[in-house]
């Protein structure tokens, strides 16, 4: 029997504007939680028709985008482009530099595109690597059912109850699980020792922990776990009218669909290997020193050292957006 991790703190992710016309609930990358190594930022975004994230640069991090509803078109200055749909993920390594555009597309019924984007720090020795992309389609993600079928776990990255993910998709070690817990269900997800972990709740309420340490958390909260403990315990009471769903990096869990009759509790449960390095961030640039940030800004402005192709580049998908 593993010892579940206790909750260190929990706080509400408040909504704010981001990009052009989009709304995000940012929980990592705020005064409440500036960073949680290796995680730099977590956004729960909603993008209505006409909104999005037009041309912008990155250096020094990886981004993981998980679509919950709708789709997102992507295009960058290397000529790469593509679309991820509900249930799909995109792993992007910015490395030494990338300039791209991300334009969510609403559903056919006009409802907004909804998703999660997590920024993961790169080890210092990899911040100069070439940019790359990996898409993971929902049909590629294996799933295991536990607790007599009351809990289902999609293993996006990592290991859960004897099931391994298809492949590693990020340079920095992370596990990602999309978990749904029905009323009366309970999940105990083991985590690698020493990894940082958090859960972000999307709908409904979920009980974390065990015994007298059990805490119930409502939607749009980020729950930070203590490092001590070998697992995270999650459950939904028998009398709840909502299913619970979450993810984990060695915990990132999210819901990937909506039920028109039942509100599905969605949450992201995330864990990752902490990096023993300084983090200095200025907007989309994540480096290890002030000098590194200044150099990134200079390189972008002068179209050098990884940003050569940014000179004069404009994405096709971003041209229709008035800036």
Image (cartoon, rainbow, N blue to C red):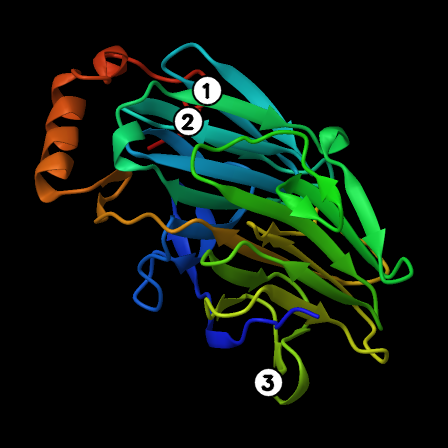
Q: Quadrant of the N terminus?
A: bottom right
- Answer with the quarter of the image where residue 220 lies: bottom right
Element under label 2?
A: strand
Classify residue 146 as left or right of residue 300.
right
Q: What residue is pinned by disc 1?
A: 75
- Per the rendering, the mark at residue 101 is 2
Element under label 1?
A: strand
Query: Marks 1 and 3: which is nearer the front?
Result: 3
Q: Position of residue 224 (x, y in %)?
A: 47, 68
Q: Position of residue 269 (x, y in %)?
A: 58, 57
- Could you tell me which residue is drawn at 46 percent across and 20 percent down? 75
Classify residue 116 as left or right of residue 163.
left
- Answer with the quarter of the image where residue 78 lies: top left
Can you name the residue that lies furthest to the front here? 1
Q: Earlier in the sequence, mark 1 or mark 2?
A: 1
Mark 1 vs mark 2, CA separation in Å: 5 Å
- Could you tell me which residue is drawn at 86 percent across and 60 percent down? 261
Q: Position of residue 4 (x, y in %)?
A: 61, 72
Q: Earlier in the sequence, mark 1 or mark 3?
A: 1
Mark 2 vs mark 3, CA separation in Å: 44 Å
Q: Are marks 1 and 2 in contact (CB under 8 Å)?
A: yes
Q: Position of residue 170 (x, y in %)?
A: 48, 33
Element under label 3?
A: helix
| Label 2 packing within 10 angstroms: few (<14), some (14-19), many (20+) | many
- Could you tell me which residue is drawn at 51 percent across and 54 percent down? 271
Compared to 136, does 280 lie above or below? Answer: below
Q: What residue is pinned by disc 3?
A: 213
């Amino acid at each position: 029997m593993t010892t579940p991790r206790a909750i260190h703190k929990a706080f509400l992710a408040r909504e704010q504007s981001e990009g052009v016309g989009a709304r995000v609930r940012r929980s990592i990358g705020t005064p409440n939680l500036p960073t949680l190594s290796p995680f730099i930022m977590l956004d729960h975004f909603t993008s209505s028709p006409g909104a999005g994230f037009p041309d912008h640069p990155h250096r020094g991090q990886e981004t993981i985008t998980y679509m919950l509803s709708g789709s997102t078109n992507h295009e960058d200055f290397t000529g790469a482009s593509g679309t991820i749909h509900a249930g799909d993920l995109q792993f992007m390594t910015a490395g030494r530099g990338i300039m791209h555009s991300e334009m969510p597309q609403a559903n056919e019924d006009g409802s907004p595109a909804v998703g999660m984007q997590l920024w993961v720090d790169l080890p210092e020795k990899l911040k100069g690597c070439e940019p790359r992309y990996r898409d993971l389609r929902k049909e590629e993600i294996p799933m295991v059912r536990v607790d007599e079928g009351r809990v289902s776990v999609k293993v996006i990255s990592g290991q859960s109850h004897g099931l391994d993910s298809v492949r590693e998709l990020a340079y920095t070690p992370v596990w990602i699980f999309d978990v749904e817990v029905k009323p009366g269900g309970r999940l105990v997800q083991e985590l690698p020792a020493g990894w940082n972990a958090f859960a972000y709740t999307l709908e409904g309420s979920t009980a974390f922990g065990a015994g007298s340490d059990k805490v119930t958390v409502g939607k749009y909260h980020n729950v930070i776990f203590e490092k001590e403990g070998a697992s995270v315990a999650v459950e939904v009471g028998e009398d709840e009218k909502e299913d619970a769903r979450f993810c984990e990096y060695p915990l990132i869990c999210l819901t990937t669909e909506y039920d028109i009759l039942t509100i599905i509790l969605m949450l992201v449960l995330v864990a990752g290997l902490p990096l023993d390095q300084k983090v200095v961030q200025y907007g989309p640039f994540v480096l290890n020193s002030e000098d590194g940030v200044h150099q990134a800004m200079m390189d972008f402005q002068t179209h050098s050292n990884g940003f050569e192709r940014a000179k004069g580049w404009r994405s096709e998908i971003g041209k229709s957006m008035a800036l």
